[in-house]
């Protein structure tokens, strides 16, 4: 009788330990390969059934080099639309991306992180370089003519308000103008866009995703590709 009780207790302990190990393994990314679309959505990620092929575009990175569709081929790229004077969502998102990027496994270190400015009037190459390096030296800032930025944003389904120089006079009120006309805020989407190695729009992470969730979802997406 005592032997049976002992075996039962041992079996229960083994079961509890197994559940604990499986839960830990799942939370730390061990099951990333088996994540379903629903599980990804629960984390704040969406992957398109058919990736969207992007049209060619021509912009410039913060070093002055060309940044085009060719720069998206051959590795994974995470793109965020923002601006250096952004008071909240941009620094918060880039901080999350920095934490995510620093803890990436070695096999995923080919990832590029890019912010395309929606404020080309104020965001010079020098300003973008200083801003992006304050989060991580590998992060890339991109600028260019507003029409080209707006076209890329449309391809990636990114909503944003134009800077005052591009808006009709009766729309300037929507920019939250301060006493100084140069102090304006641009409304924009906070999603982080996922570009696969074929230069296709693969999906996105929503603005509320945290760095640990971002890591889990990203590794699952990479493993399933």
Image (cartoon, grey):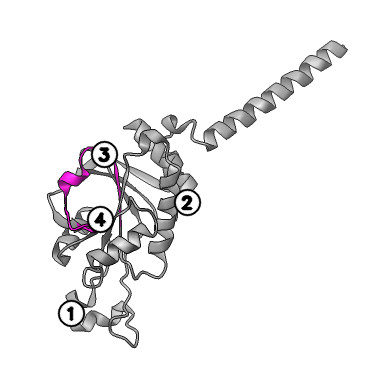
Q: Residue at x 33, y 74 (%)?
A: 185
SS at badge 1: loop
Please give the name of the residue rendered at 30% of the width and 77% of the height, measured from the top-left corner. Answer: 175
CA separation in Å, label 2 and label 1:
37 Å
Q: Residue 130, percent across and down? A: 32, 63
Report which residue position mark 2 lands on. 210
Question: For the residues carrying marks 4 and 2, which lies nearer the camera in this image?
Answer: 2
Using the image as rendered, state which of residue 151 and residue 92 is in the foreground. 92
* Residue drawn at (35%, 55%) of the image: 191
Q: Is residue 224 magenta?
A: no
**Eye-nearest disc, 3 or 4:** 3
In the picture of the structure, the residue carrying the numbered disc 4 is 157
Looking at the picture, tell me which residue is in the foreground, 83 or 48: 83
Estimate the spatial distance between the alpha carbons at disc 3 and disc 1, rounded to whole Å. 39 Å
Q: Earlier in the sequence, mark 4 or mark 1?
A: 4
53 is higher (above) or lower (below) than 165: above
Looking at the rendered image, the quarter that the C terminus falls into is top left
**Label 4 neighbourhood size at 10 Å, few (<14), some (14-19), many (20+)?**
few
Residue of label 1: 168
| Quarter residue 184 falls in | bottom left
Q: Quarter-wise, where is residue 222 in the image? A: top left
> Which is closer to the viewer, label 3 or label 1?
3
- Tell which circle, 3 or 4, labels the residue nearer the N-terminal end: 3
For the residues bearing labels 2 and 3, Cβ distance under 8 angstroms: no
Residue 5 x %, y %: 83, 17
Q: Which residues are magenta?
A: 61-80
Q: Position of residue 29 (x, y in %)?
A: 49, 35
Label 3–label 4 contact, CB within 8 A = no
Residue 75 has which mark? 3
Left or right of 45, for residue 16: right
């Amino acid at each position: 009788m005592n032997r049976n009780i002992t075996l039962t207790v041992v079996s229960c302990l083994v079961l509890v330990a197994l559940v604990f190990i499986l839960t830990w393994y799942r939370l730390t990314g061990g099951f990333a390969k088996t994540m379903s679309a629903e599980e990804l959505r629960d984390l704040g990620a969406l992957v398109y059934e058919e990736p969207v092929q992007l049209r060619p575009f021509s912009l410039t990175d913060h070093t002055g080099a060309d940044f085009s569709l060719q720069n998206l081929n051959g590795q994974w790229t995470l793109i965020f639309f923002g601006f250096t004077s952004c008071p909240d969502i941009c620094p918060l998102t880039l901080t999350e991306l920095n934490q995510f990027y620093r803890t990436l496994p070695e096999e995923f270190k080919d990832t590029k992180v890019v912010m395309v400015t929606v404020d080309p009037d104020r965001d010079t190459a020098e300003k973008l370089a200083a801003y992006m390096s304050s989060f991580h030296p590998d992060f890339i800032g991109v600028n260019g003519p507003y029409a080209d930025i707006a076209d890329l944003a449309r391809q990636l389904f990114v909503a944003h308000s134009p800077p005052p120089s591009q808006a009709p006079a009766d729309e300037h009120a929507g920019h939250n103008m301060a006493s100084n006309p140069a102090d304006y805020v641009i409304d924009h989407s906070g999603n982080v866009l996922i570009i696969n190695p074929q230069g296709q729009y693969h999906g996105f992470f929503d603005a509320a995703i945290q760095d640990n969730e971002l890591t889990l979802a990203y590794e699952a997406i990479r493993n399933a590709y």
